[in-house]
Image (cartoon, coloured by chain):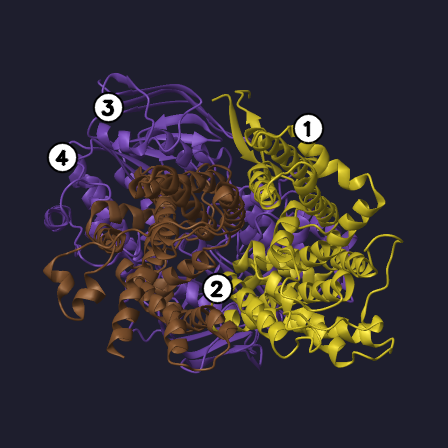
Chain colours: A brown, B purple, C yellow
Amino acid sequence: MLDSVIFLLASTLAAATPLLFAAVGEAVVEKTGVLNLSIEGMMAIGAATGFVVATLSGSYVQGFAMAAIASALLSAVFAGLVLTFLANQVAAGLAIGILGLGLSVLIGKEFEGTTIIPLQDLDLGTLSELPFIGPVLFSHDVMVYVGMATVIVCWWVLSHTRLGLIIRAVGESPSAAATIGYPVLLIRLLAIVFGGAMAGLGGAYLTLAYTPLWAEGLVAGRGWIVVALVVFGMWRPLRIAIGAYLFGAVSLLELFIQGQGYAIPSQLMSAMPYIITITVLAVISRNPRLIRLNHPASLGQTYNKSA
Amino acid sequence: MNSLLQLRGISKIYPAVVANDRIDLDIAPGEIHAILGENGAGKSTLMKLIYGVSQPDEGNITWQGKPVVIKSPAQARNLGIGMVFQHFSLFESLSVAQNISLAVKGSIKHLSEQVEAVGEEFGLPLSADTLVHSLSVGERQRVEIIRCLLQQPKLLIMDEPTSVLPPQGVQQLFNTLRKLRDTGCSILYISHKLEEIRQLCDKATILRSGKVVATARPGEHSNEELAHLMIGRTIAPPEHAPAEPASEQALSVTQLAYEPDDPFGTRLKDINLQVYPGEIVGIAGVSGNGQNELMRLISGEEMLTKQDTGDIFIGSQKSNTLTATQRRTLGLGFVPEERLGRGAVPDLSLSFNGLLTAYRHGLTRFGMIRHKKVRAFADECIAQNDVRCGGNQSVAASLSGGNLQKFIVGREIALAPSLFVLSQPTWGLDVGAASNIRKALLQLRDNGAAILVVSEELEELFEISDRLHVIYDGYLSPSLNARSATATQIGRWMTGEFSNAGEVA
Amino acid sequence: MPYRLVARTEPSLRAQLLVPLAAILLTLLAGSLLFTLLGKNALDAFYAFFIEPLTTRYGIGEVLLKMGPLLLIAQGLAIGFRARVWNIGAEGQLLVGAIAAGALALHFESSDSVWLLPAMICAGTLAGAAWAGIAAWLRTSCNANEILVTFMLSSIALQLLYYLVSGPLRDPMGMSFPQSALFGDAAMFAPLMDNTRVNTSLLLALIASLVAWIFVQRSMPGFKLLVGGQAPEAARYAGFAQKRAVWIGLLIGGAAAGMAGVGEVAGPLGLLQRSISPGYGFAAIIVAFLGGLHPIGIVFAAFFMALIYVGGDMSLVSVGLPNSSTTIFQGMLLVFYLACFLFAHHRLQRIEIKR
């Protein structure tokens, strides 16, 4: 029993890591007032690119780097649509999401169904050998810790630095920020590209460490759960991280429950993440004041510099 | 004399208008220089060019003797130009110090100290760690001014600064500006209020239709002379016969206390208000004191909930939870403060914007739109109210603010309201258009309608109202007879000094 | 900068027609670049993709067959989109509609009543609307974002279908294949053209288009939805109920998608199985935009999208294009459409100084 609890907790960190990267990236994007719904497609591009590059080069570093670059490029197209062509952010997010899914299949065409040796767990010496805590916290691959570090850095930047102040200002009122003299479009572009790169890393983590294989449709709705996580986390990185870990745990309950021998239809278990997300979303959103106090005021609105 | 700032032949062209036409302007160091002109004369455009928000299509700017091209506000600030906008560029969810740090270098702690020091020096008290959303409009203006002062500007531009201040606040502001001038800073003061300019400014450049029509020393001219220069003709205030109100109230708000959903909104406390057919009741007050909330409750855009107390009657009908549509069938007409996006749909044609509130008046049949009638209704509103536009298919966003307001007011009047409620009816309009709207309101009153007007322009309220209330921090004052009330008294009330006033008209 | 972008004072019909055409043209150009990069002859690929399907009776039939559900769903979604109610879960609403109709057909397997098919249509439509109604309820009562909820609901619907076809609704004679028994003849739409798979459900889509046109262009409720989407504050001011707009927007989309689901199972499929729709619910989102959210434009857009579907299948075989081409084309179409759409409401104006 203890073994399976340790396994469950340890796996939670791994299951949450792709969500963590993408959600923290999306939180930064949304903090500047831009809603990017194309996470699913960007994670898919990252997953495929990372897998293909790592397989061909044998280098995980190159795999993750190229995944981040590929997704960032795709997100730059999104940025072009919403910033330059003033496109509706919802529609543009859907368009880029679909394009990303299609391109990911094309990129991974020759590698469909192949596997890769997963990213190695770090050996942290005595830390890894600690009872309980060792296997749960200190026996993971490096990206699990990079993910945690990213959360902390984003939290620190958003709440304790001048850059964070600027990001929040642009998200609250782009026109006022422009009046003071901040390059609103440039700031939003950089945030979108950062969010894209993070989604790419999250996607690559799926194929290079978590599954570890490439198959069409492997992201399986995680990109949308990421968007919900940002709402759940009230646009605060630390809260988002808690949400991601909780969600990771819930998504693993399937294995756990089946291991205990309960006869629950597998389809119900597959649907469970979505059912839980909807429920949590409904409960969180019930409080309009809470949302209003936290959500970037210009979120989703087209900003026209000349008007 | 060496000019601090010199403009020569500055023009700015927009699709429909030449907003600035070959403007020349000279500002000396240490002077308060007024840019005088009515709404739409091109004042704001000119300021944006000087502050680098937009760039002129032709002409030259010289700053301290050197030719410059001001590409951005940041560059303007580096040159030593600061600007206080009419619509503040502040962020509600950030603190005063954080707001200031977005424009001024330095740590939050250091800035906080400076905010309080400069505030002390110039009579602008502020606490640096307050969140901006909890500040009054006047306090927000202080934040803007201090933000400029911390950058030690050589030129400070102020765009219609007094529209957000009660009369005493205006005097305080003038004292601050004079102190600032005495330190050698020049001030460019934009306004259409003649009396203020005569009091404060050393020199005035008068704009009309985008052109400089005169430069003058305002102290040496009368209000009438300046008005004539500004408008180019004389407009008489409307005839205003005493009201003959009926005895059955058209609108009655009793002991209303209301908590808005919006965490940044103003709570209403114990509001009592009656409007009778045949009179115009005005509500004065600095914006942000609960006007918006009260208007939404009367219009039905917001409804009272269980946690609120008090009643709203339209005619004899209790209306606390009636929808906006139900209230309209009771004879309510309403013109909101925001024209684009609330009073009209920006991307829809004027035809459809007529349909927006007039659809119950024969423009539909069995739920189907009668397009011919809709266009005819829009044409009528356009013709009756001298709306300048490209026709009934023009989208609302393509009209100037004044013309759109004429259309909206015309549309509501065409529906023959028995109770007509307006918020800032002439805000941003030129003098002629404003005067026409005021005349139309008096006409409607004489035909027996009950009218409620919320405005920040005291002069306007005195011109058309029969009775006056003042709103402050969610409290509504008792009413005064507008003919016997004085601006001083209303001004005092605007800072809340009516709690034990007993006078009721 | 001799030009600047200015908003149009009146919407231009010409620009509105040119925008989707330009988007299609740009997609073709980008597509040919992509095909060339993949080492294919771009002309051959295009022929296979866009011309070949229209050269045979069977091909035309397939295009019309796929046009039906796309058209129906897109008309429904467009009404919601005009009100800025973002239903992106039509795929799930389609599945639930198919399940409801299928369950009815299987329950009355041996019936030959002429009322069976109409009853299935009603059941599917209502089920689709009810599925979307969950999102409407969560949005109006809990303020939950309908984009996320509709998407999640469509994933849940898929699992529901998987469960039913491998359990309660599985064909007992079907050797544990995850599919239901075949429907009876009374549960099927009649063929519309000989030697093709087109059936009378296409007529439903055309009728729905006519109704949508009347609703959108002529009716007051349609106008209220439009105002609610473009300027929520103005809708509030005019007294148009916001919650009702959310309900109508989602229910109409759900109903249309549910009806399309009936058309699939009672048309080309004739049974319930794990795969019912090749992503019609998502493709219809693109159709709705490409058609300018206008009922007439959507008819043309649906035809073009159906062509992409059929062309994608055919070129897979004849030229060896990857099967993801269809998705990539769909994505590019919407990307280019959104870029071009700027010019539907703006135009480039030469800056001239004249007085």
Callout 4: helix, strand or loop? loop
Q: CA distance from mark 1 to mark 2?
A: 44 Å
Q: Please state the chain letter of the residue tagged with numbered disc 3 in the rendered image.
A: B
Q: Mark 3 near mark 4, Cβ–Cβ under 8 Å?
A: no
* Residue with the most extreme right position: C194
| Rendered image: mark on residue C145 | 2
Pointer 3 local density, CA inside 10 Å: few below 14, some 14–19, many at least 20: many
Residue annotated with mark 4:
B183
Callout 1: helix, strand or loop? helix
The amino acid pointed to by label 4 is Thr
Callout 2: helix, strand or loop? loop
Judged left or right of residue A144, residue B207 is: right
Q: Are marks 3 and 2 on the same chain?
A: no
Q: Mark 3 near mark 1, Cβ–Cβ under 8 Å?
A: no
Task: From the top left corner, tell me how far across and down residue C34 is, in percent.
Answer: 56, 33
Q: Are marks 1 and 2 on the same chain?
A: yes
Q: Please state the chain letter of the residue tagged with numbered disc 1 in the rendered image.
A: C
Judged left or right of residue A189, residue C59 is: right
Judged left or right of residue A269, residue C164 is: right
Residue annotated with mark 3:
B4
Q: Mark 1 near mark 2, Cβ–Cβ under 8 Å?
A: no
**Residue C350 visible here:** yes
Residue annotated with mark 1:
C43
**Residue B65 appears in which quarter of the rendering?**
top left
Q: Please state the chain letter of the residue tagged with numbered disc 2 in the rendered image.
A: C
Nearest the eye: B395 or C33: C33
